[in-house]
Image (cartoon, helix red, strand yellow):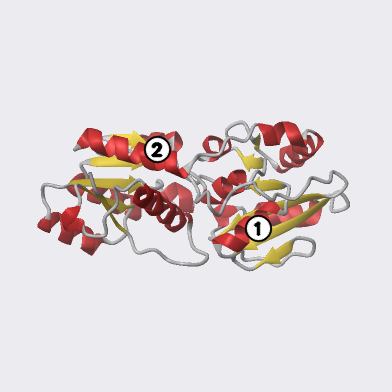
Amino acid sequence: MKIHIIFKEVDGPWGGGNQFIKALRRALIKQNVYTDNPEESDAILFNSHHNVEKIVEFKSRFPNKLFVHRIDGPVCLVRGTPNMETDHEVFDLNNQFAGMSILQSSWSLNASYLLGFKPVNPVLINNASNKEIFHKNGKSPFNRDKVKVISSSWSSAKNKGLETFQWLDENLDFSRYSYSFVGRVDAEFKNIQKLEPQASDELANTLRSHDIFIAPNINDTFSNAINEAVTCGLPVAYFNSGGNAEVVQQGGIPYNNFEELLKALDVISDNYEVYRSLIKPRDIDDIASQYISAIKKNL
C-alpha cells in the first residue's frame, strides 16, 4: 500500500498542522508506504480546507482511490468566532471527497457532532512530533530555586492565551519563576522574555532548557505546542479547554482560572520529578502505523 499527501510543507517556524504533516510524511517514508507520485498511491490524504484545487483535480483523475481527510477544529471554536464559514467549507469537502476522516482528538469529534457536522467514516488518531528533533535527551537539570517556565505559539490569535500572558507578566512571582515566550504575540512584556519564532531544532533546544510549559490556549484541537513540550519532557499547566487534556494526559495539571494556574505551577514545581515521570509522549512512528492500519481497513 502507498499513501500520497496533498500538502505543501513550509520549512522553518510555522503552524502545528504543517509541523505534524512534515513529521508524518517522514514517518511514512520510513515505513516504506509513502509516494510522491499520486498515480502510484492507493490512498490520498488531504488536510482541513487546504489545497482545494488539487483535491478536486486528483479526485477527477483518480476517482477510485481512497481520499482521507484530516480534519481540524471546529475552526469557529479554535478561532473563537461565531463565523462557521470555514467549517462548512471543511465539511463540504469532507462530504464530497472523503472516504474516511481522521479526527485528532475526542474533543474535536464531539464538538463537530454537537455543531451538526457529520464526518465521513471518522477515525480518532492523535498527533505526534518529530522525535529526532523533539526529545528529552540533554534536558537541563531542574533547579527549584528558580523554576524556568515557558510558553510557545506560532499564532498570535487571542485564543492562544494573550490575556493569560498579560496577567502573568503582572502577577507571576518572578523571584521564584522566570518566564519565556517563543513565537508571536500582540503584546509587550515587562517581565516575560519574548523570543522570536524559532525553527524546530532551535525551539526543541529552548524547550529542553526550561522546566514547565504553560498552555493557556482555548479550544485547540490537539495543540502542537503542548505536544512538542511534553515530548521534550516538560510537565504542563494547561487551561482546561479543547483537546489540551488529551495531549497532556497525566503529565500536568489543568486550571480554570488565574489563581488555579498559579497553584498548578507551585504543585508541579514542588513535585517536579513525579510529574515528569507521568509524561507519556506519543511516538510519531506509532501514529504513522495507526494511519496505515486505519487506511488499510477502508481500502
Of circles 2 and 1, the one toward us is 1
Q: Is residue 17 left or right of residue 6?
A: right
Q: Measuring 61% from the left and 56% from the top, which residue is drawn there?
A: 204
Q: Is residue 281 left or right of residue 37?
A: right
| SS type, badge 2 | loop
Front residue of 143 and 113: 143
| Residue type (three-letter) at the residue carrying disc 2 | Ile
Residue 76 drawn above or below residue 241: below
| Residue 84 visible | no
Q: Quadrant of residue 298?
A: top left
Q: Which mark is residue 160?
A: none
| SS type, badge 1 | helix
Residue position for label 2: 125
**What is the crowding at mark 1: few (fewer than 14 residues within 10 Å), some, or many (at least 20)?**
some
Q: Is residue 191 left or right of residue 93?
A: right
Residue 165 pos. (x, y %)? 69, 55
Residue 136 pos. (x, y %)? 64, 46
Q: Which mark is residue 205?
A: 1
| Residue type (three-letter) at the residue carrying disc 1 | Asn
